[in-house]
């Protein structure tokens, strides 16, 4: 199985409502993505605004100087002006998209299917004549007529595209359908490689991306923290972890995921929920007594992989759900030895205060002092 990541935080991710990256931030994110090891970076749509143009220019300079190693893509409508802009920037590859469902043809370009085929052929050839490597993306491919999608792909391939992006633009794909679609396309039109661009409107973007890979897609589009239009696209950290678990492939340096997630959280201003997979604050925090007992004996009981794989550490919280094992462990970690009956009394106090969300170490020590009648000295932190 062959699979890599194209990260589009700088293009799709900046299409999240309220998100604007400065040029400096754009360059920093690109460097971090390259260090992470993504195969491709979709650096932006340069025709959108001068600052995006400038950001891509600086990223391409760093690529030429060897500081960035991923392939750099410039995004483009199927119009000459956009294509010329990407060519002028000397991006490694252009990504040209065109909405090919009847809904898109009617609502946006107002072209017939035949006219659209002609435009796709002309614009892909035009990009080719500028010496660019080309990905052609069939936008809204999953709502398009399948036989027309096949014609579109053949047209783009014959005009010079060596990669085809299949965009699930409104996120309605379903894993079994994703696998079927990519199996069909890779057999029907070989000689090109396929990308999956999955929106997350139904929360299925990760599942659809994995299924697409099973069907033959070789590149998954992601954004850090799942940013993007509406509810975003496949989150990089979740899909990378899922690929590790299910296929045992390291698509990126997994231990660097928290760093890039925090960086993008800060620059985008979009907070990552604590219960976000892999990089959320609670991703490796346990709570119920029986869970904590399990992880203290064998972490595999409630963890799909060790948190260290992803640069994280495990912990547990203390509240009314806590059991004796967790409490004993917590006091031992603090260097405080309590007798069995003292522990039980502390636990009873905790359980009689059900509205407390988290007991901090200092709260626990206070309760223990109350129970034992002694001043307790915790071990100083190492
Ligand atoms: C979408 O359809 O949502 C896209 O952003 C497609 C554009 C592309 O992948 O080039």
Image (cartoon, rainbow, N blue to C red):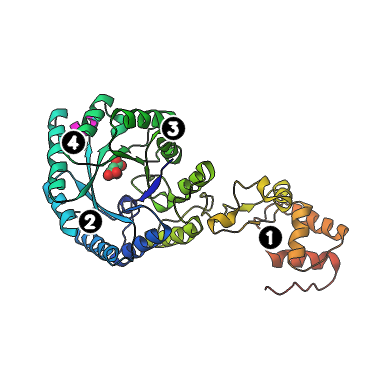
Q: Quadrant of the N terminus?
A: top left
Q: Which residue is mark 1?
A: 359
Between circles 1 and 3, the one closer to the viewer is 3
Q: Residue furthest front?
A: 191
Which of marks 2 and 3 precedes in the sequence?
Answer: 2
Between circles 4 and 1, the one closer to the viewer is 4
Q: Which mark is residue 184?
A: none
Q: Which residue is mark 4?
A: 158
> Which residue is rendered at x = 15% and y = 33% of the image?
116
State the image coordinates of residue 16 (x, y, percent, origin top left). Answer: 34, 51
Q: Which residue is mark 3?
A: 175
Spatial CA distance of label 1 from label 3 is: 42 Å
> Which residue is rendered at x = 50% and y = 48% of the image?
241
Spatial CA distance of label 3 from label 2 is: 33 Å
Which of marks 4 and 3 precedes in the sequence?
Answer: 4
State the image coordinates of residue 75 (x, y, percent, origin top left). Answer: 24, 50
Between circles 3 and 4, the one closer to the viewer is 4
Between circles 2 and 1, the one closer to the viewer is 2
The residue at label 3 has a CB less than 8 Å from ligand 1: no
State the predominant SS element of the stretch in magenta. Answer: helix
Spatial CA distance of label 2 from label 1 is: 53 Å
Read off the magenta span.
Answer: 102-106
């Amino acid at each position: 199985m062959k699979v890599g990541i194209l990260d589009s935080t700088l293009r799709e991710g900046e299409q999240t409502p309220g998100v604007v990256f400065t040029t400096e931030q754009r360059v920093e994110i690109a460097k971090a993505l390259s260090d992470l090891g993504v195969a491709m970076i979709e650096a932006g749509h340069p025709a959108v605004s001068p600052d995006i143009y400038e950001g891509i220019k600086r990223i391409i300079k760093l690529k030429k100087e060897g500081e960035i190693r991923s392939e750099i893509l410039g995004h483009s409508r199927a119009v000459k002006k956009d294509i010329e802009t990407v060519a002028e920037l000397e991006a490694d590859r252009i990504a040209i998209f065109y909405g090919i469902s009847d809904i898109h043809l009617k609502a946006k370009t107002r072209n017939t299917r035949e006219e659209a085929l002609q435009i796709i052929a002309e614009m892909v050839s035009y990009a080719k004549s500028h010496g660019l490597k080309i990905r052609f993306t069939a936008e809204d491919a999953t709502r398009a007529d399948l036989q027309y999608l096949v014609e579109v792909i053949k047209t783009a391939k014959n005009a010079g595209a060596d990669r085809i992006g299949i965009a699930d633009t409104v996120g309605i794909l379903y894993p079994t359908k994703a696998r079927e679609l990519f199996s069909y396309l890779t057999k029907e039109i070989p000689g090109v490689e396929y990308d999956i661009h999955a929106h997350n409107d139904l929360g299925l973007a990760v599942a659809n991306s994995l299924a697409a890979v099973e069907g033959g897609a070789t590149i998954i589009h992601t954004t850090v923290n799942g940013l993007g239009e509406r509810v975003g696209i496949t989150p990089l950290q979740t899909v990378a972890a899922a690929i590790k678990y299910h296929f045992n492939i390291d698509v990126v340096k997994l231990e660097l995921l928290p760093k890039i997630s925090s960086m993008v959280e800060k620059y985008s201003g979009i907070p990552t929920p604590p219960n976000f997979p892999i990089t959320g604050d609670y991703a490796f925090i346990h709570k119920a007594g029986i869970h904590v007992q399990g992880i203290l004996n064998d972490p595999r009981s409630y963890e799909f992989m060790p948190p260290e794989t992803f640069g994280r550490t495990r912990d547990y919280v203390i509240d009314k759900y806590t059991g004796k094992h967790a409490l004993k462990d917590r006091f031992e970690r603090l260097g405080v030895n309590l007798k069995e009956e003292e522990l039980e009394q502390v636990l009873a106090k905790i359980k009689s205060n059900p509205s407390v969300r988290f007991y901090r170490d200092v709260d626990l020590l206070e309760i223990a002092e109350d129970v034992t009648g002694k001043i307790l000295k915790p071990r100083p932190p190492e």
